[in-house]
Image (cartoon, helix red, strand yellow):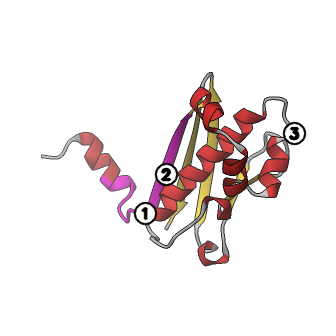
Amino acid sequence: MKHNLEETLDELIPKKNFSLGNDLVFLPDFKLSFNPLFKQKVYTQAEIDYCELFEDNMLRYASTWAAKEAVYKAVKQVNSKPLPFKRIEILREKISGKPQVILPNDYKNLLISLTISHDGDYVWAAALMKI
């Protein structure tokens, strides 16, 4: 006999046509490890420009990093091709606006919903991808 939660999930997601990625960043550790080389290898110029708009730019860099990690994890569940973090771009239409995921042309068919949150010393992101 199945547990009620399992039965409910089986009914809600019969095709299992999604993947989910998430990431949790501890801000104090992120700040200690952040350096110019990491910034150059991971972030696009548009992401850097966005993060630098804020007085507490480390929170924005950490949020963007968590979002990139979440997207990476969701994509890797269905596509094993290498995907450098700099090729995953997280943009916002306006300050503190809805985050948008921009991927290389090879991944344009993927639909990804992204959410980013922070509370105290923690930043969290989740990416839900329709397959």
- Span highlighted in magenta in the image: 10-25
- How far apart are the alpha carbons under marks 2 and 3? 27 Å
Looking at the rendered image, the disc whose residue lies closer to the viewer, 1 or 3, is: 3
Q: Residues within 10 Å of mark 2 (few under 14, many from 20)?
A: many
Secondary structure, mark 1, is: loop
Q: Is residue 70 left or right of residue 9?
A: right
Real-space CA distance between mark 2 and mark 1, rounded to the nearest whole angstrom? 9 Å
Kindly identify which residue carries mark 2. Answer: 21
Mark 2–mark 1 contact, CB under 8 Å?
yes
Residue 42: % across, % down: 67, 54
Residue shown at 47%/71% (left/top)?
79
On residue 77, the disc is: 1
Helix, strand or loop at disc 3? Answer: loop
Where is residue 123? Give x, y as percent.
60, 34
Q: Which mark is residue 129?
A: none
Q: Where is mark 3, residue-wise?
A: 53
Please, what secondary structure does the residue beneath circle 2 have? strand
Inter-mark Cα distance, 1 to 3:
34 Å
Q: State which tag comes first along the sequence, 2 or 1.
A: 2
